[in-house]
Image (tube, grey):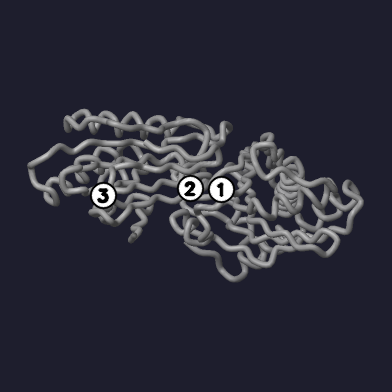
Amino acid sequence: MSLSDFQRDAIREVMSIGSGHASTALASKLKREIDIRIPEVDLCPLEEVPEKIDVLDEITIGVYTEIKGDLRGRLLTIFSQEDALRLEEMISGKPAQKQKGFSAATVTGVSDVLSANSLSAISDFFGMKIEKTPSETVRDILGALLQQVLLDISQHSEAVLFSKTEIFVSAEKFNCHQMLFLEAPSLDKLLKAMDVML
Amino acid sequence: MKKKNVGIAEMKICRAPEVLTILGLGSCVAVALYHERTKTGGLVHIMLPDGRAEKRNRPGKYAHIAVPALHKEMLEEVGRKGRIVAKVCGGSKMFKSATGFNIGADNVTAAREELAKLGLKIVGEDCGKDYGRNVKFTPENGKIVIRSVNGVITI
């Protein structure tokens, strides 16, 4: 299963609209200059996800949300621990704790704004109603986090929409990945909705 | 020291001084078999408790196929002399909100049952809980070192 060029452009466009709204929301909340870009979106088979991110034994911060309504699935946003700490320090202005005390509050907040806006862009664009559950943040080994999510979703899904995301805070860059795991019927629905736009 | 990594649904056997690793073990479960006499270790990275056999050759995918398959390969490698013992780790649940069944716990239960059927004794375990694991199995001494966000333990 793969995206046509048109579908890839369409979903990147929609995700970019979402990230644009997220930038505005975060900029006014944090009183900083914020720019969020989505340089790359692709549909990736579940079994290729671990290859796509090759640092499986590194500690990462994962923010996990369930999606319900017209589209069903999960959304996982991941930051490397290094980027999460830098972001936390930059925004809070205080040195962040690397060990257990690291609250990841900033990363969770940023991910929540990002995912809420990505989902609302999708719902506005395609006229769908989508809800998300409160997110859960976990700091753990990347491979292990992915493994649980993949096993959790693998009964309902075969592919994930993978968005490389760059967050610029006052021109300093932070990377994250947004992974939208839609259940198979929901993914079909989304792809069909894109094709209708042609 | 040569390291061999065991990917998801894979199974590998090696002899000291080689070591076997699994990077990022989450809800999957790892079963290690150890034959002290020949310092031989086998490790399998199991995804699910059971399921239909597939055409693709991934003997490590399901516990009910993977554990007997690993045992058979070990016997072929080390012969009938000397005892083989088992260690089990993994099967965690990091995201509490992940819905559905607790696949990690089911994987651990299935692995234990399969080992019991084969009469293999479990001599070490680090299962369940809420953190992922990086695993290193050293057939030189039969020890498994597990690194996680909570520190390092040896079983």
Do the numbered discs 1 and 2 sit on residues whose CB atoms are within 8 Å? Answer: yes
Do the numbered discs 3 and 2 sit on residues whose CB atoms are within 8 Å? Answer: no
User: Could you tell me which secondary element the residue under label 1 belongs to?
Assistant: strand
Q: Is residue B105 left or right of residue A127?
A: left
Identified by mark 2, the residue type is Ser
**Label 1 or label 2, whichever comes before in sequence order:** 2
Identified by mark 1, the residue type is Leu
**Residue occupied by mark 2:** A157
Coordinates of residue A14 in the picture (x, y in percent): 71, 59
**Residue occupied by mark 3:** B59
Coordinates of residue A74 in the picture (x, y in percent): 59, 43
Q: Is residue B65 above or below residue A193?
A: above
**Residue occupied by mark 1:** A182
**Residue positioned 22% across, 28% down in the render:** B116
User: Could you tell me which secondary element the residue under label 3 belongs to?
Assistant: loop
Q: Is residue A52 above or below residue B38?
A: below
User: Could you tell me which secondary element the residue under label 2 belongs to?
Assistant: loop
